[in-house]
Image (cartoon, rainbow, N blue to C red):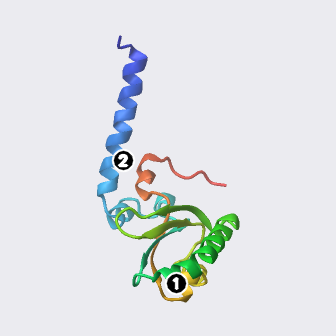
Amino acid sequence: MITAQNLKSKTVGLCCMVALAVASCLTPEAHAADQAGSAATDKVPTTRILAIGSFTRQPTKAQLDQMVPQEVSDTAWLAMDGKIDQWFARQDEEGVVFLMNVKTPDEAHALLEKLPLGRAGLMKFQLIPVGPLWPLTYLMRPRPKP
């Protein structure tokens, strides 16, 4: 049974989804021009670094036997220290994906290069800064003044 409350709830949800879909299609430049001078257009901060790792060349079995125990231990310590928030195995090729709690690619690079596979030049990372989804600002009211 459709009630007025259900209809209102579904309408609000649909409007939010449409607004987010439209906002995600706009460029940051268009958004900035539209909201010139607004606190909503402040550049979003980098809150994590997405580190996508792949082998530079296939390590030998002897290299893996020698390095993997220390690699796993050092990586686990990065997670325990809060530097790696999440870690995954890649499904498209051999490698890893880390969501890192650092603010710059340089900081992520410095940490990853200290790992055994990084020191040996066997692992490289694509480092992508990520932050809050800026199109959400279209759905937000102006930032309250402190």
Residue depicted at x 45% and y 83%: 60
Q: Quadrant of the N terminus?
A: top left
Say which amino acid is labelled 2.
Answer: Leu
Q: Which residue is mark 1?
A: 63
Residue depicted at x 34% and y 65%: 92
Question: In the image shown, does 66 or 75 lie closer to the viewer?
Answer: 66
Say which amino acid is labelled 1.
Answer: Gln
Secondary structure under badge 2?
helix
Is there any visible trace of residue 43 in the rendered image? no
Is there any visible trace of residue 35 in the rendered image? yes
In the figure, residue 7 lies in which quadrant?
top left
Q: Quadrant of the C terminus?
A: bottom right
Q: Which residue is mark 2?
A: 20
Residue depicted at x 44% and y 58%: 134
**Can you name the residue that lies furthest to the bottom here?**
120
What percent of the width, then of the height, locates residue 122? 47, 84
What percent of the width, then of the height, locates residue 125? 46, 78
* Residue 53 to residue 47: above or below: below
* Residue 90 to residue 112: above or below: above
**Mark 2 Cα within 10 Å, few/some/many (few <14, many 20+)?**
some
Mark closest to the chain's N terminus, 2 or 1? 2
Q: Quote the CA–CA distance across marks 2 and 1.
A: 48 Å
